[in-house]
Image (tube, rainbow, N blue to C red):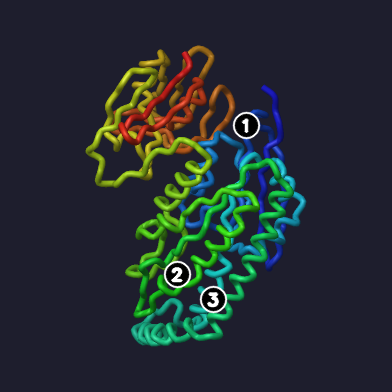
Amino acid sequence: MKQVQTLFLVIVLLCGGLFSYVTLTRAEEDKKVYVALGDSIAYGYGLSDTDMGFVAQVGAALEATVINLSVNGMNSTEFLVALQNEEVQTAIQQADILTLSIGSNDLLRPFTEMIMTALGPSLQNPSSLNELSQMIQKFSELTEILNDAETVAVFQAQIAQFEKNWVQLISKIKQLAPKAQLVVNNFYNPFVHTSFIGVPFGAYTEKYIPQLNAIVQKHQSLGYLIVDVYTPFQQVGLTNVDAAKFSFDPHPNQKGHNMIADLVKQALGLSVMPSIDPDDSIKKIKTVLNGKTRIFEQKSLRMNDQYNYVSANEFAEIIGAKIIISKNLQTVVITKGTEKLEGKIGEKRAKINGNTVTLSMPIKFQDTHLLVPIEGLTKTFGGSYKYDQQTNTLKVRIEL
């Protein structure tokens, strides 16, 4: 099969400067190139494994070469600077699909800095009852500071600058990749319904975040699809914010990343497995493999509240493949003729017909089933899959 170049970009943010370099390897020519642009949300900050972030999930669904150019802490002004970098431009020019998640830090960075300044370094992590009492007193003064006319002016200036940056950066991206499909995420309120010691964080940030979203909507004629993450993130439990545990980390947790991944995939017209309630595991899901039906409990076919797996045992039986599992239960080979999937239990890295790939989820055992990510099997043996939410049916078609 023909080969082309795959880009791996490492970006280092240091002392306000952006430095980057590119290392080239080889990849299949018929693979799409998916370039993710953005900040720590797209980077996957806060996850135990960044390969579980929405960018990796979308890349797996696209079966694309993924180039993630996202940088923790970046705002739209810094992103404009990054767009002048030749290596960044080269990566964007190769893209078939681009996602953009930038601008949250235009508000959240000054917001956080304002809170930290008000508290002072000694009270940011109180270690005594006296310091805790002082922190509570400072928080009682914070509402007045946040509503001060000067403070409001600072945030309105940030919003005005964001709009200027947004038009410039979208125009530059479209100039570099005029034929690529561009999907942008709007902004969610990480502190929705959040109050702490009388300070209504959520109500305060809600004054400004919709203004950012209005800007994104206003300039859609520049040529991009909008993924609405604002609305679903109105529900609690999709970020790491938990005031009861003194956690104000605004980043999406795993459920939040799953949600964003599903929304982006829907925007791109890809098949989406539905998120489900963790307590909803007694329901059954119908799996149809080449017209033959099997019934499984949902818990046997999901991970991180999404359907990602099929039972390799049933799969192999129906298509006439063989499964070879090592005596120490560490490695597995699924083979039929010259087609072969090789992997290790608990790992996402595998080999498909001799080529090393990263699956969306690790191969695993559960309830006597050997579970393999759907895309790994369809990619190995040739085929497709689609979930029908109305009938609760997962349809998998393999070319025999």
Q: Earlier in the sequence, mark 3 or mark 1?
A: 1
Whichever of callouts 3 and 2 sits on the residue coming sooner in the sequence is 3
- Residue 102 locus on image (x, y percent): 58, 59
Quarter assignment of residue 362: top left
Which of pointers 1 and 2 lies earlier in the amino acid sequence?
1
Locate residue 195 relative to residue 58 in the image: left or right.
left
Query: Which residue is denoted by mark 2 in the rendering?
Result: 206
Rendered location of residue 94, percent (x, y)? 70, 41
Residue closest to the eye, 202 or 44:
202
Q: What secondary structure is marked by label 2?
A: loop
Kindly identify which residue carries mark 3.
113
Type of the residue with mark 1 = Lys
Q: Nearer the viewer, residue 207 or 190?
A: 207
The residue under the point 66% across, 55% down is 170
10 Å neighbourhood of mark 1: few (<14), some, or many (≥20)? some
Q: Residues within 10 Å of mark 3 (few under 14, many from 20)?
A: few
83 lies above or below 372: below
> What amino acid is labelled 2 in the image?
Glu
Name which residue lies at 48% across and 81% down. Answer: 146
Q: What residue occupies the far right of the structure in this picture?
A: 86
Mark 1 lies on residue: 31
| Disc number placed over residue 351 in the picture, else none | none
Q: Is residue 275 above or below residue 289?
A: below
Front residue of 178/400: it is 178
Seen at 32% across and 44% down, the residue is 276
Q: Is residue 72 visible?
A: no
Mark 2 nearby-residue class (10 Å; few <14, some 14–19, many ≥20): some
Per the image, label 3 sits on a secondary structure element best described as helix
Structural distance between the alpha carbons of marks 3 and 2: 18 Å
Point out the frontmost of discs 1 and 2: 2
Residue at (71, 39) in percent of width and height:
24
